[in-house]
Image (cartoon, helix red, strand yellow):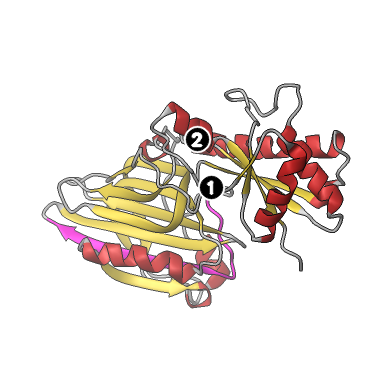
Amino acid sequence: MIRRTTKRPSRALAFACAVGLALTAIPAHALMFEFAGPATPTGERREALTSYRIPVGPWAGGSMPTELAEGAFDQTAWRIAAPGKTTLELLRPLRDQLAKAGFDTIFECETAACGGFDFRYGTEVLPEPEMHVDLGDFRFLAARRDGTDGPDYLTLLVSRSADTGFVQLTVIGSDGIGTPDLVTSTKSALSTPSSPVLPAASAAGAQSDLGLALAAGAPVILSGLNFPSGKKDLPPGDYPALAALAAWLNANPDARVDLTGHSDGSGNPVANTALSAKRAEAIRALLITQHGIAADRITARGLGPALPIASNDTVEGRAKNRRVEVTLTPTR
């Protein structure tokens, strides 16, 4: 197992989420990871030089076979917006990229074949919520690539929750190659199709458009909700988009909705995700306290910078990405 180390700011976390990220070894042999959906880095651990035992077989009979790797250590986790995707669908494109970059798979397993609970807790994993592992649904892959300065080892641990995938990448580089840099593009991939916008004015006239969009399963942007930078609460005032949503909920007493907060790509993505959740919860509170909507009809969550609708490279684009959307909760 790895010796515990002190965390330091990650270059991977310095640039917010994107669908693809480049993993660049030194020298050459660039590897482009394209996830199955928009990816948000959630945590990492690094060490300049250490020893690490790579699992190369399943847990059985109280132990599992390992192969000793030495060098620079880098471990990073991502949360993937991939509703409906299986762990195999999350892993397969990454495995294909590894093969193209010259890595040979030396071990791969799935849940029970890995050794289940014992394998999971015999393997180094970033803590919750940075990396989530469902003990009934995870996959593991170990790979190796030999270079002129020695071998590089790489492992992937993939799991999921109801609508979110989780990927942990662990890299051990030889002394001559060092740890690959993890960077993301500053030009975030855009969420498509664009969400319709519930106007900030004419609340009564907006109800029919809102109803049509929600019935079609589309998320609707609540416009006119201008949160101050870094703040979770709206300034006091009237918000016609909220009045329109409340009026529609009153006219449809059996309907329930989900509020989802989104942020731009500036700053720490983990903090942005927490802030986006607080903003969605603030809108939920206004609908309950000021408009009389029952609390059990509204849920709130935050996705942070995972699903931009405009470029994060402009002031205008970042403003558009800071938004709250409403969707109709599916009936069971």
| Position in image of residue 270 (x %, y %) | 53, 38
User: Is residue 60 depicted above or below 123 in this figure?
Assistant: below
The residue range painted magenta reads 130-147
Q: Is residue 266 visible?
A: no
Label 1 secondary element: loop
Mark 1 and 2 residues: CB-CB less than 8 Å, in contact? no
Q: Which residue is mark 2?
A: 264
Residue type, label 1:
Glu
Residue 53 lies in the magenta-colored region = no
- Looking at this view, is 330 or 186 the one in front? 330
User: Is residue 84 depicted above or below 306 in this figure?
Assistant: below
Residue type, label 2:
Asp
**Quadrant of the rendered structure where residue 91 is?**
bottom left
Query: Which circle marks residue 75 in the picture?
Result: none
Label 2 secondary element: loop
Q: Residue at x 62, y 51 (%)?
A: 219
Q: Which residue is mark 1?
A: 130
In primary-sequence order, the first of circles 1 and 2 is 1
